Image (cartoon, rainbow, N blue to C red):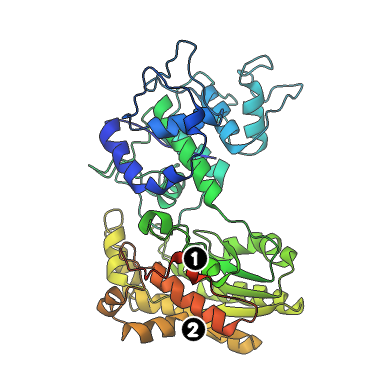
Amino acid sequence: MRFPQKCKAAVIFTGLLSILLFFSTITTSASAAAPLKDVATTHWAYQDIQSLLGKNVLTGYSNGTFKPEQDVTRAQAAKIIALAAGIEPLNPKTASYPDVATGHWAFGYIEALKKEGVIHGKGNGLYAPDDKLTRGQMAKILTEGFDLVGHSVNSFTDVTTTDWMFTYVLALRDNGITVGYPEDNTYRPNGIVTRAQMAAFANRAMEWKALQQPALPSKVIGFGDSNTSGSYLPKEFPEYPNHNWPTLAGITNAGVSGNTTASALKRFKQDVLDQQPSTVVMMFGLNDALMRADTKQPQVSKEQFEKNISQMTTQMVAKGITVVLMTNLPVNERVYYQSQAVQNPGIEKLYASKGGLHAWQDSYNDIIRKVAQQQGVELIDNYANAVQKAGGATDTDLANSGLVDPLLGFHWTPRGHMMVAHSVNVRVPGTHTTLAQFNNKTPTSR
């Protein structure tokens, strides 16, 4: 459960709203909320405020106002976050924090969040319920509460890898919850959160959660990271928000944005084995291979990546599940370097000794090919298919192919997802194309 913050509201959050425009189509209860005297329909947070009023997560004042610029306290934030995340308040006999007694109005919400591991106090045994909530604190609470995961190395100019809130702010940015302050690429972690800002980020976090597609029992499951989940599609390709390859192939989508094989192993039993599928189509590796700016090491080493892929494959085969391994897309390394250069000017050097990002990523594909051959399971070589369709593997070839996204250079475009879905339909029994539901549009990169 988590959220962000303030300053020059109209300009900053107009940018946020444009980037997160797809969220506006999800809200269904906003119209039920009564109009507020101090929040005009032109206010940057109007839709988010109305949405949370309709969901009973926030309330206005008895005089018909909302007071959008009023600061939010840590106690108020606990209640809002608990309600947004659907966490029921608790009423233990003893208080966890001496400054939040059992009779405090926010006691139940604070106790519930503490039990869930969302809040941990201020490190001195106190919670400080009347202190103002900062943007850095909000990032942590949102990330912990909604299980957000960051997948890049690029953050903001005022949030570095040594800052305690770095991973939390990164998770907000990578999942489209915040873009910070575009005019100077800052996040301003010490700024105080207002009621309007809390409404905006709480609502967007709730809607982000609603977009997630947990694995359900199905004969065929697609298991992977963002290039399976398609979580970036609504933001980058708003005309094709559900154009991910599992949906196109008519199978269950068990992709989670930002996953490495290490993090995927933690949900492998619940999202794959417990579903008792007949077939699992699996694609991991891009996040594993990404180099960390702080350690200058990959997120998952090649040796560990091979062990993880082999372990999951072995377990599925042992249970009689048909396994189909897939390689990842060819990366447009120039686009990726440019997208990360602001926060990590030395990004290109991290991959120089490895032959460049493109070659480094494909070396993880080689491991996938190796495991498929060793274990005798089906392989769909998406990398080779994409290079063949692009007419080459250069950045120019990939950019012109319309298969690789033009913003980060390591996501499938809707056209790329169509290619993968077609391969699944051809190679995996029991799947079927659902492309007709997209009115036979031919997606292009944006």
The residue labelled by disc 1 is 437
Q: Which SS class for mark 2?
A: loop
Q: Residue at x 64, y 21 (%)?
A: 107
The mark that comes first in sequence, 2 or 1, is 2
Left or right of 99? Residue 412 is left
| Residue 151 place in picture, x, y as percent | 45, 58
For badge 2, the amino acid type reads Asp
Q: Residue at x 32, y 67 (%)?
A: 445
Q: Residue at x 47, y 31 (%)?
A: 31
Q: Residue at x 37, y 23 (%)?
A: 39
Q: Which mark is residue 381?
A: 2
| Residue 328 place in picture, x, y as percent | 46, 75
Whether residue 154 is visible? yes
Q: Which SS class for mark 1?
A: helix
Camera-side residue of 39 and 155: 39
| Residue 247 place in picture, x, y as percent | 54, 66
Extreme residue in the left direction: 183
Camera-side residue of 314 and 41: 41
Tell me the crowding category of disc 1: few under 14, some 14 to 19, or many 20 or more residues within 10 angstroms, Cα based.
Answer: few
Camera-side residue of 350 and 105: 105
Camera-side residue of 323 and 268: 323
Pointers 2 and 1 in contact (C-beta within 8 Å): no
Quarter of the image containing the N terminus?
Answer: top right
Tell me the crowding category of disc 2: few under 14, some 14 to 19, or many 20 or more residues within 10 angstroms, Cα based.
Answer: some
Extreme residue in the top direction: 63
Q: CA distance from mark 2 to mark 1?
A: 26 Å
Whether residue 198 is visible? no
Q: Is residue 382 above or below residue 286?
A: below
For badge 1, the amino acid type reads Gln
Q: Nearer the viewer, mark 2 or mark 1?
A: 1
Q: Which mark is residue 427?
A: none
